[in-house]
Amino acid sequence: MLHLIPAPLHRAALRGAHALRRRWWRLRKPRLSGVRVIAFDGEGRVILVRHSYGNGKWMLPGGGIKRGEAPLAAGVRELREETGCGLDSAALLDVHDEPLAGTVNRVHLVCGRATGDLRPDGREIVAARHFAPGALPADMATLFARCLPDWITAAEAVLPRG
């Protein structure tokens, strides 16, 4: 249904909705629960995405965990929605709290092996690419620039060789 809306209009609506959501979080300070996915392709590269809203920097795919949804299932769902890829050998790597728009987001860090081809929707996700762990982009969100190399190392240690 949402694909009936032209992509540029859809992206503008997402930016507006994101701004409203951040204001709501600052006022209400809800308990947020989210997931980020470290997904490796067959060459050991990690998938990063750029959203059409927010700061526009490279980051891991991910999003909110739905009520009653398991973190691993949320990671699989979010990776599929944002990149078109599946996730094999999914494992929970870490759970930590991150500040987000005046509240706290409990983030479940999921890792696994990506399957299929990257197909960002051009609406929520405007770019998706594979990056070698030693050649990550300079224009990543601050948290990712600081933490992603260590997260990648930890994920590589957890996942079966493939």
Image (cartoon, rainbow, N blue to C red):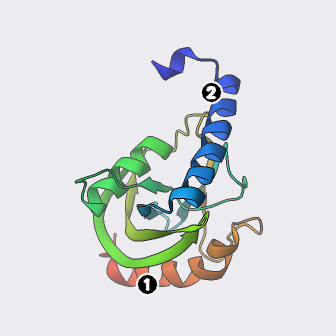
In this rendering, the answer to whether 57 lies above or below 82 is below
Q: Nearer the viewer, residue 35 or 162?
A: 35
Query: What is the three-letter code of the residue carrying label 2?
Result: His
Which residue is rendered at x = 41% and y = 50% of the image? Answer: 78
Q: Reading the chain from its start, which is encountered first: label 1 or label 2?
A: 2
Is the C terminus in the top left, top right, bottom left or bottom right quadrant?
A: bottom left
Q: Nearer the viewer, residue 52 or 106?
A: 106
Q: Secondary structure at mark 1?
A: helix
Image position, residue 76 (x, y; %):
33, 53
Is the N terminus in the top left, top right, bottom left or bottom right quadrant?
A: top left
**For mark 1, what is the residue?**
154
Image position, residue 99 (x, y; %):
57, 72
**For mark 2, what is the residue?**
10
What is the crowding at mark 1: few (fewer than 14 residues within 10 Å), some, or many (at least 20)? some
Q: Secondary structure at mark 2?
A: helix
Which residue is rendered at x = 38% and y = 77% of the image? Answer: 95
